[in-house]
Image (tube, grey):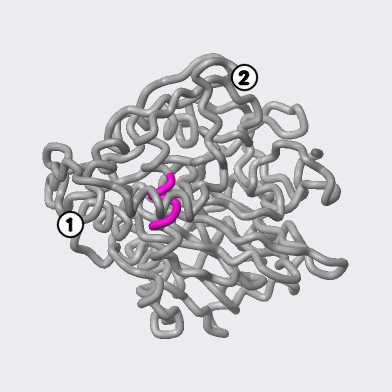
Amino acid sequence: MAPGFTCLPYYPNYDRWAAKLSSKGSIDEALPHGFPCQLNSTLVWDGQNLPLGEHTSSDGTECVLQLTNSQLEEIDAALRHFQALERPLDQLSTETFPLPSLHPVLRAVSDNLHSGYGFTMIRGVPVDNYDTKENMIIYVGISSHIAAVRGRQNGYFNKSSEDVMITHITNYLRSKDDNRPLPAGHTDKEITFHTDIGDIVSLYALGIPAAGGESLLASTWKVYNEMAKTRPDLIRVLADNFPMPIGTNYSIQRPLLYYQPPKGGKPERVTIQFSRRTFSEIRPKPWPINLSDAQIEALDTLQFLSRRYAIPIQIEKGDMQFINNLCILHGRLPYEDDSTHCRHLLRQWLRDPENAWETPKTLQDRWDNLYSPELSNGPQFYPLEPPLH
């Protein structure tokens, strides 16, 4: 192992973290310049005090949008309308997938994502009534009313160069003995709290596991408030530069935590953008990343505070999950498939230009790689099956 190599465990040790926390002496309580002592917003919530049953509606303003029979009929009619047009999936839009009555409800969903609770579950689509392509049309069609811009998730599929707009999230491990260094999201193992890339992360459940696999969502702003109150020194660490690997032998420096002061009638905002996997031993091509003890402690604290305040959600067949990737941290519990149950989700990375938050400057290049037409790798591609692994 190279000198200075910090092999960060992907799964941190809670007892070790708690012991270090309890033995901590006095700390410098100063926050970075301009950073708030506390954030006050609907976006600040504790999952233990957010029962989804009490936050369910049919108008898009709550955490759960439970589709009504008339809304489902409108979705089915929009599917048939798009099929009759005989157009490719990249032409799905609010015009080609018309939802006249549901459209304002889905715009309310976007409002909730950006200035409400930061996440919405859409429930009730009878996924088994449709084949894979029809489900994809429904998913992309509904999403176009919430966030019209779709991000590319890859530049190739089975070695073919194209803009891959949908990712299949399922277990790619061939057996329990398969130890390939795959991302945790492509296995049945636990996923630690993290963010993806882009403004909105969305999932659509085509299949569910036999057991486990709960989605875990945590308010970034709640985590921030707790750290600002108890460990402001770690706020400073997160707001300072971390070495971010690019490829196999190059890195850039950027913060994991960003503050945006109020401007032009928009409120102050805090954003965290990170993945523990970036620094961990399960990175496909690890190379020397020299993290300080304080940086490791900050990453561990993000994980355990997120778990403390998270809301666990059992995703059911036909559920669509939309989260604001700029203010929600997400993870997943391990799961088990069997002969009749297989967890299989579709994922999109989306952006709503009407409600979009300002992108931090040091993240703009990554956002352009997703959303900029000038950086296209080829035609848009919506794979009906997972890639070969």
Residue 367: x and y in percent read 42, 34
Q: Is residue 327 above or below residue 244?
A: below
Quarter of the image that includes the C terminus: top right
Tell me the SS state at disc 2: loop
Q: Nearer the viewer, mark 2 or mark 1?
A: 2
Write down the region rendered in magenta: 300-305
For mark 2, what is the residue?
Answer: 1
Callout 1, which amino acid? Gln
Q: Is residue 125 magenta?
A: no
Q: Residue at the location (48% across, 60% down)?
A: 322
Quarter of the image that includes the N terminus: top right
Of mark 2 and mark 1, the one earlier in the sequence is 2
Packing grade of label 1 (10 A; few <14, some 14-19, many >=20) is: some
Relative side of 343 to 125, left or right: right
Residue 213: x and y in percent read 64, 64
Q: Residue at the location (55% across, 31% down)?
A: 7
For mark 1, what is the residue?
Answer: 38
Tell me the SS state at disc 1: loop
